[in-house]
Image (cartoon, grey):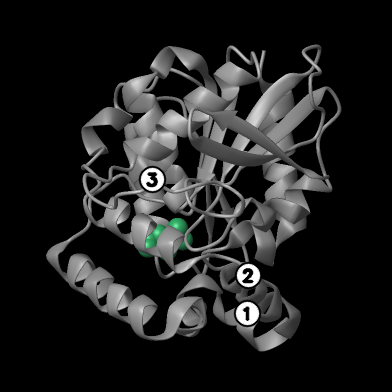
Amino acid sequence: MTRQYCHIGSRTIAYLDSAPGNHDLRTYVLLHAFPLGANMWEPQIRSIPKGWRLITPDLRGFGGSTELDSLSALSIADYADDVVDLLGELSVTSAVIGGLSMGGYAALALVQSRPGSIDALVLADTRAGADSQESRANRRNMLAVVDREGPSGVAREMMPKLLGQTTRDTNPSAEATVRRLIKQQSPVAIRGAIHRMMHRPDSTALLATIRVPTLIIVGEEDTLTPVQESQRMAEAVTGSTLVTIPAAGHLSNLEQPDAFNAALAGFLVSLK
Ligand code: MLT
């Protein structure tokens, strides 16, 4: 799938699109984690259910998308706005919206701003709460790592948190893939994302307002957003389905793609 570019004013939004211009298909959008780009969805791009079109944007600054000139007043809502603008440009009026981790924060920001444009929701390895004081302190340390060492330093720091124990023990190529995906990103994108995540609002109360079918996925060995976080979200979202993926950590879509794809496809085909 070749990268597409959408220019809106002085901004460029890059994205992967499995069926450009095809409005006969139903659309689902997958939003990537930190500090990766749309390419993290490669295993999902290879497994698109019949009748569906997949769009995966690079969030602001990542991949081929531009970041704002100024890094002040950054908000996680910026990412949601980009999704709205992109779908508007592509004349896609409603879509299933999914996101993994930071992508889930962006999906929840979209629930907040445009609930009517979402057909259904997928929240993978994410949480509804805001950062704790301790998480913010860790983010500040990560900002220092980006300044000092760039994306390679971030890759080194993040790796043990992104991949589950089973993957680290048994699948060395997964680590190489994730390292490559992180090193493709710019320090500007990474800094922008850290600022947005550390100031994102608490979306816990929003969960009870969700009225669309919702799939919650979590890797059994996820230590960044542990299973209990997903269980709490599943209890709060009426009628949601929770799928736990065995032998996967935080990047469950990359670590156990077959199980992740089966959960996603089962959900999509169940939608009316
Ligand atoms: C992610 O995977 O997107 C991030 O680790 C989320 C976070 O740091 O809160």
Q: Mark 3 — residue?
A: 68
Across and down, in percent, residue 101 comes to 45, 53
Q: Mark 2 — residue?
A: 247
Q: In which quarter of the image is the C terminus?
A: top right
Across and down, in percent, residue 184 comes to 61, 68
Please count the marks in the image: 3
* Circles 3, 2 touching at the beta carbon (< 8 Å): no
Q: Amino acid type of disc 1? A: Thr
Q: Mark 1 — residue?
A: 166
* Circles 2, 1 touching at the beta carbon (< 8 Å): yes
Q: Residues within 10 Å of mark 1 (few under 14, many from 20)?
A: some
Across and down, in percent, residue 188 comes to 42, 62
* Above or below, 135 relative to 193: below
* Above or below, 162 relative to 104: below
Of badges 3 and 1, nearer the viewer stands 3
For marks 3 and 1 on the same chain, the one whose residue lies earlier in the sequence: 3
Of 184 and 113, the residue lying toward us: 184
Q: Quadrant of residue 157?
A: bottom left
Left or right: where does residue 84 sit relative to residue 266?
A: left
What is the CA distance from the residue labelled 3 to the residue labelled 2?
38 Å
